[in-house]
Structure formats: C-alpha cells, structure tokens
Amino acid sequence: MSGAESDTFNLADSASHLLHRAEQLASDRFTLLVGKDVTLRQFAVLAAIAQAPGVSQAELVRITGVDRSTIAGIVLRLQKHGWVERADAPTDKRANAVTLTSEGEVVLRAATKHAKAADAAILDALPRTKGKALIAILKKLTKHAEELAGKAEKQAKRQAKRDRVGAANQKDSKRRARK
C-alpha cells in the first residue's frame, strides 16, 4: 500500500460518519411517521421533560446531549407551540424549570407511538441479537460521553476558580505596588 493510500479517509469505515448516517436514518424514519410537526430532537426534549417534570434547561442538556444554545432554542419553540411552560426554578432563580402543558402531553403521546415504530423499523433491519447488542453499545457510548462531559465541566469550574484567584492575586499585587 502506498503512502497516499494510507492517508485517505474512508467514510465507509468511520465510526463517527456511520453514527451520523444512522442518526439520519432515525430522524428520517421518525419524520416519515410523525410528520414535520415535531422533530426528533424536540421529541427527545419533550420525553425528557415528561420523565423529569420541572427539569432545568441545564439538566436537559445533560439528559438529551443537545448543546446549551440549541436546547434554549428548542425550549423556546416548544413554548411558542404551547407544549411546555417555563418558570423560575424554585431552588435557583437563575434557572428555568420546564414542564409539559396538557397540549404538550397530547403531542408527546401521539409522537411516542411513532418514535417506537421508528426504533422498531431501524432495529428490524438487524437480527434480534444484533439489535440488542447495538442498543447496549449505544448505551455504553452515551455513558462514556456523559462521563467525559462531567470531567470537562469539573475541569472548567476548576479553571474558572483558578482564574478568579489569579485575578484577585493580581489586583492585590498591584494595590501593594502602589502603596
């Protein structure tokens, strides 16, 4: 094999590309069954809120894996549809507690049967044991991603604290130098 061949990137063997394509399949199948009223991401957010009523938007990021700015937009759209309500969280006035409205519950119930059918259609493409193995692998990857995100968050908090302490020390040094 020549050096040029070893440097090529084969999409057919790329885990990240194949996962993206599988996600496209899931999204397309969901849209085919549900229609364009609810996206797969919106469904995931509605389902997460139903599982944890009063959940904060920050917690929705962790539960769904959707980034913070995208969650904010999704929750805003869901609120405009009348499917969710936001209120100040009882324990943290800076956070929003998100709950489903009765209309949101109806939308979620209707979409749930289609989401299950979309999952079944995807898994039906595999032998039963392979489908179970795929779910187990995806759960493991999700757990790993959550652990990495938790470590990154802790690291960011430590760095922010170091930055604050460093800035305070720098102010003290300047104050002492002026004396």
Image (spheres, helix red, strand yellow):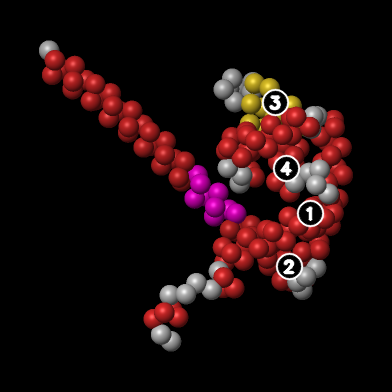
To which residue does mark 1 refer? Answer: 30
Q: CA distance from mark 4 to mark 2?
A: 25 Å
Question: Which sits earlier in the primary sequence, circle 1 or circle 3?
Answer: 1
Q: CA distance from mark 1 to mark 3?
A: 26 Å
To which residue does mark 4 refer? Answer: 42
Image quadrant in which you'd find residue 172: top left
Q: Nearer the viewer's eye, disc 4 or disc 2? A: 4
Q: Position of residue 18 (x, y in %)?
A: 62, 66
Is residue 171 found left or right of 141 in the rendered image?
left
Question: Which sits earlier in the primary sequence, circle 3 or circle 4?
Answer: 4
Where is the C terminus found, in terms of image quarters?
Answer: top left
Q: For mark 3, give the secondary structure.
A: strand
To which residue does mark 3 refer? Answer: 86
To which residue does mark 2 refer? Answer: 131
Q: Position of residue 31 (x, y in %)?
A: 79, 52
Image quadrant in which you'd find residue 105: top right
Is 28 in the magenta? no
Is residue 103 found left or right of 153 in the rendered image?
right
| Rendered view: 12 above or below 86 | below
- Residue found 38% across the figure and 37% down from its top: 158
Q: For mark 4, give the secondary structure.
A: helix
**Residue projecting furthest to the front:** 4
Numbered range of the magenta stretch: 142-150
Q: For mark 1, give the secondary structure.
A: helix
Q: For mark 2, give the secondary structure.
A: helix
Is residue 33 found left or right of 140 in the rendered image?
right
Is 148 in the magenta? yes
